[in-house]
Image (spheres, helix red, strand yellow):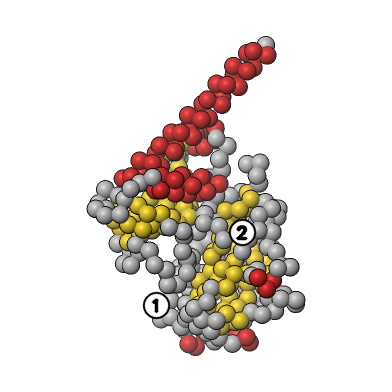
């Protein structure tokens, strides 16, 4: 009986390994397909893989991002660089990825995009069955995705100043117990306030605090929160796990910052006035208030 259990366990383990190798092979082929039109090596960075039409990431996102990075590093036409999300980044191309659950499969699309003009140099796609993901115990949506699904509008074409915000995770995913660092940058001197929306929809101002109240941001300087001057401040990822959001509000005047984000967000419904990465840009008649945001997904290490 014991021998039978060992045999069954070996078969299950072998099947899981085959499923994982199969997905890894699909990613490798998709990455190689992106470079068909690339004649000389290009520097490339790899963005998080998002749920199509959103800035939502998941356990599947983290897995795909890691595989893409591995296979891109082994492709002699690509020179993988550290992900840059600042305003004045210097890179040739970006690999962008999305996934979309449809019936019994998850469709994954990759694009190689020229950074200077957003020209698409290559596109590839493949599908993963939900059965494969279930066998590997990989979640393709965060637990609370449908509670905080969001709409992302187009940016204002008449900018006042640019504000960007991004996390210290290349794939926007964290395990419980990890520490989140928030990076922000603007092209104009301003003051800022950071709001956090937890997976259960609770909204809290996390910076500035009573003890750490220096919320001035100098133009062109990337500031990490918490930084070296805020060593006692920590943004530790805690339960409940799921999709969370950071919103940064900035204004050229301290008095222009909102006390709350009630006017900008219904925490468990639709996000208004927010766009990923390039973010919103305010007009002169709006007190110079600018909103930047990003989503991240927290996961249990037991997943």
Picture layout, residue 284 above or below residue 115: below
**Seen in the image, is 180 located left or right of residue 83?**
right
Q: Foreground residue, 149 or 181?
A: 181
Image-quadrant location for residue 47: bottom left
Q: Foreground residue, 263 or 85?
A: 85
**Seen in the image, is 133 located left or right of residue 181?**
left
Q: Foreground residue, 289 or 150?
A: 289
Picture layout, residue 231 above or below residue 282: above
Q: Residue at x 63, y 61 (%)?
A: 180
Which image quarter holds the C terminus? Answer: top right
Question: Residue 157's mark?
Answer: 1
Residue 265 appears in the picture as rendered:
no
Q: Residue at x 64, y 70 (%)?
A: 227
Q: Cα distance, mark 1 to mark 2?
A: 28 Å
Q: Residue at x 67, y 11 (%)?
A: 1
Disc 2 target residue: 244
Residue 226 in the image, given as x and y percentages of width and height: 65, 68
Residue 18 in the image, given as x and y percentages of width and height: 48, 29
């Amino acid at each position: 009986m014991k021998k039978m259990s060992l045999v069954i366990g070996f078969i299950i383990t072998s099947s899981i390994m085959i499923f994982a190798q199969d997905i890894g092979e699909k990613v490798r082929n998709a990455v190689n397909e992106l470079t068909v039109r690339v004649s000389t090596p290009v520097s490339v960075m790899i963005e998080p893989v998002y749920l199509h039409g959103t800035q939502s990431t998941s356990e599947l996102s983290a897995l795909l991002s890691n595989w893409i990075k591995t296979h891109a590093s082994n492709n002699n036409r690509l020179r993988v660089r550290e992900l840059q999300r600042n305003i004045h980044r210097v890179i040739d191309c970006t690999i962008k990825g999305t996934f979309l659950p449809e019936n019994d499969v998850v469709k994954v699309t990759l694009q190689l995009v020229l950074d200077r003009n957003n020209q698409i140099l290559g596109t590839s796609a493949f599908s993963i069955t939900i059965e494969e993901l279930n066998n590997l115990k990989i979640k393709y949506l965060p637990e609370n995705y449908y509670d905080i699904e969001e709409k992302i509008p187009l940016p204002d074409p008449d900018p006042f100043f640019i504000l960007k915000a991004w996390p210290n995770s290349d794939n926007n995913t964290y395990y419980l117990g990890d520490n989140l660092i928030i990076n922000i940058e603007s092209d104009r001197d301003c003051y800022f306030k950071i709001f956090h929306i937890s997976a259960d929809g609770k909204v809290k101002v996390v910076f500035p605090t009573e003890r750490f109240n220096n919320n001035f941001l100098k133009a062109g300087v990337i500031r990490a929160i918490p930084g070296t001057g805020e060593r006692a401040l920590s943004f530790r990822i805690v339960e409940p796990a799921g999709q969370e959001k950071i919103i940064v509000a900035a204004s050229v005047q301290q008095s222009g910052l909102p006390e709350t984000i009630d006017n900008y967000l219904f925490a468990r419904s639709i996000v208004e006035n927010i766009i990923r990465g390039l973010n919103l840009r305010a007009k002169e008649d709006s007190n110079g208030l600018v909103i930047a945001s990003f989503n991240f997904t927290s996961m249990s290490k037991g997943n």
